[in-house]
Structure formats: C-alpha cells, structure tokens
C-alpha cells in the first residue's frame, strides 16, 4: 500500500481482488505456448519471440491485481489501483452509510464476491467486483465504524469534562469517566434501536450541559 497512514491510524485489513481473475490470462498464455510448441510451421526463434511477447499479457494482469487493493484502517477505507498510472480514493468511516456484499454460487465456493459501499451524498455509491473474502471486508468496515464512533464519543466526553473542570474546578477524574460511560451507554442504546436519533441527541446535549 502506497498511502501513508496518519498519526494514530492503524491498518486493520488489506484485501485484493480474487486470484481467479488471473486464471484466464495465464491459461490463454499456456494454451498459446502449447500450440506453438506442437507446430512446426515457425522457426524456434520466432516461436520463442511470440511466447515471450504473449507473456506480457498475464504479467500486466498480475501487476494490475497486485496494485489493485482495498485497505481498512481505524479511520477510513482506502481504494488504490494502478502501477504505471495511479488512482486512490478514500472514504472516511463516518461518511459511510451502508456496506453490503453479494456472492453468487461460484463465489461462495471459491471465496469471491462484490462489495457495495454507500457513502455520503456528495461521494455517492461505489461497487467493487470480484473481491477476495467480501464478507470479511464488509464486517471489518462495520466493526471499524462502531469502534470509531465509540472513540469519538469518549473523546468528546473527556474534552467536555476537562473544559468544565477548567472553568469550575469542580469536576474530578471520576466525574469525567462517569460522563464518558453515560455517553457510551446512550450510543449502545441507539445502536440497538432502544432510543431514536432525536432522543440520543437530546440526552447527549443534556449530559454535556447544552
């Protein structure tokens, strides 16, 4: 992966397309080589030249496969591709609205499928095809989102408690932790559907003194 990680950013998973996409170019090269070796119409030097030139195709496909990857960190999803020309796209975890995966029958047998990532309106929807371990990629993104939200809530609670402590001098480390715990409980209730988004926002504002 060529993308440089940010401070405190950790790589959770790195996934390529499934190796099955390399089968066709390699098989085509092997078939051409076999046909040339069993024919006597061309000289050995010409046959060798054709075989070497034909090998460029599977080699280029391998390079494309190697540098076409998806990385999930504790902050974002990174999509990279290209060796001679480069393309990179980043989707922050808090901008991802939904992640889905689909596997046909052969995909379930060989372990490949498609992953659909829906992000904020300005970023749109992106579909990745022939992904190796699509369910693992989807689950990793989902878990990373949950951890990211929990860390955000904990950070907000700590910052709020510290700000109150500076102005009043009445908030101790214990009360800071209490606020963080209450915010974490509220988030869990929201995730389970026990409270609505509006109720969560109202209770959060109450805890923060807004």
Image (cartoon, rainbow, N blue to C red):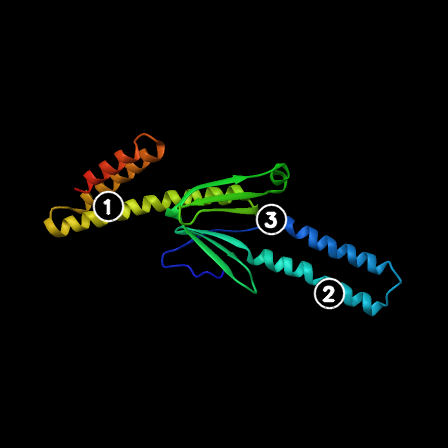
**SS at mark 1 in the image:** helix
Q: Which residue lies furthest to the right in this view?
A: 40
What residue did someone put label 2 on? 53
Mark positioned earlier in the residue sequence (2 or 1): 2
What residue did someone put label 1 on? 157
Instruction: Name the residue rendered at 58%, 50% in the picture.
Output: 17
Neighbour tally class for label 1: few under 14, some 14-19, many 20 plus, Cα within 10 Å? many
What residue did someone put label 3 on? 18
Residue 127, image x, y percentages: 52, 46
Residue 35, image x, y percentages: 82, 57
Instruction: Name the residue rendered at 81%, 68% in the picture.
Output: 46
Q: Which residue lies furthest to the bottom in this view?
A: 45
Numbered disc total = 3
Residue 177, image x, y percentages: 23, 43
Indicate whether 60 appears above or below 22: below
**SS at mark 3 in the image:** loop
Out of 49 and 150, give the one closest to the viewer: 49
**Residue 49 placement, left or right of 168:** right
Give the quarter of the image for residue 176.
top left
């Amino acid at each position: 992966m060529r993308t440089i990680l940010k401070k405190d950013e950790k790589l959770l998973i790195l996934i390529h397309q499934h190796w099955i996409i390399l089968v066709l170019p390699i098989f085509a090269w092997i078939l051409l080589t076999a046909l040339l070796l069993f024919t006597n119409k061309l000289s050995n030097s010409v046959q060798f030249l054709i075989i070497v030139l034909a090998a460029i195709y599977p080699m280029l496909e391998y390079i494309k496969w190697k540098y076409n990857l998806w990385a999930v960190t504790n902050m974002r999803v990174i999509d990279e591709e290209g060796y001679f020309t480069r393309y990179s796209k980043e989707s922050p975890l808090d901008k991802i609205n939904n992640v889905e995966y689909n596997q046909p029958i052969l995909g379930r047998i060989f372990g490949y499928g498609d992953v659909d990532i829906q992000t904020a309106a300005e970023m749109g929807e992106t579909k990745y095809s022939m992904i190796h371990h699509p369910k693992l990629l989807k689950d990793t993104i989902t878990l990373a989102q949950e951890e990211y939200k929990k860390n955000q809530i904990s950070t907000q609670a700590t910052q709020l408690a510290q700000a109150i402590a500076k102005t009043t001098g009445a908030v101790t480390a214990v009360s800071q932790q209490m606020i963080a715990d209450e915010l974490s409980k509220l988030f869990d209730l929201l995730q389970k559907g026990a409270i609505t988004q509006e109720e969560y926002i109202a209770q959060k504002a109450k805890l923060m003194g807004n």
